[in-house]
Amino acid sequence: MKGRQRGMTYGEISKKYNITRSSIQRIIRNYPNTNKKRYPKEKLTKNDKRRIKTLIASQYERNAKFSINDIKD
């Protein structure tokens, strides 16, 4: 990217780094897309997580037993 910002052509960059011209074009064209997250989105929102923590804390104070199905509900 710095080479293009300095006014270098794709051919000049490819000779400098010994990479094919088409690879340089692809790298520069896809540069903004390299920061995408590569993991799935979380299924629980912050609010859901807070509710679960509150539920567990309240049950823990009462020494009550509960199952994962209670938390899911």
Image (cartoon, rainbow, N blue to C red):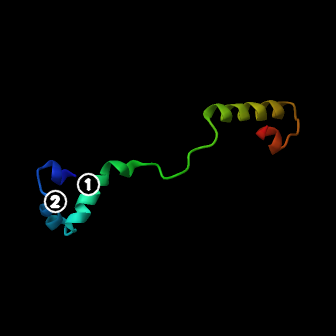
Give yes or no for contact between labels 1 and 2 (Cβ–Cβ under 8 Å): yes
Numbered circle sitting on residue 69: none
Q: Are there few (<14), some (14-19), or many (20+) residues within 10 Å of tag 1?
A: some
User: Quarter-wise, where is residue 53 in the image?
Assistant: top right
Apparent side of residue 15 relative to residue 28 in the rendered image (left or right): left
Task: Indicate the amino acid at tag 2.
Answer: Tyr
Query: Which comes before the other along the chain, label 1 or label 2?
Result: 2
Which residue appears at 16% of the width and 48% of the height? 5
Q: Position of residue 46 (x, y in %)?
A: 61, 33
Task: Indicate the amino acid at tag 1.
Answer: Ile
| In-front residue for pair 15/59 | 15
- Judging by the rendered image, the residue that carries numbered circle 2 is 10
Q: Position of residue 27 (x, y in %)?
A: 28, 58
Which residue appears at 77% of the width and 35% of the height? 56
Element type at mark 2: helix
User: Quarter-wise, where is residue 61 in the image?
Assistant: top right
Position above or below: 50 against 26: above
Which residue appears at 88% of the width and 35% of the height? 64
Q: Position of residue 13 (x, y in %)?
A: 16, 61
Q: Are there few (<14), some (14-19), or many (20+) residues within 10 Å of tag 2?
A: some
- Judging by the rendered image, the residue that carries numbered circle 1 is 28
Element type at mark 1: helix
Give the spatial CA distance, label 1 vs label 2. 10 Å
Apparent side of residue 66 relative to residue 2 in the rendered image (left or right): right
Apparent side of residue 32 relative to residue 37 in the rendered image (left or right): left
Which residue appears at 87% of the width and 31% of the height? 62
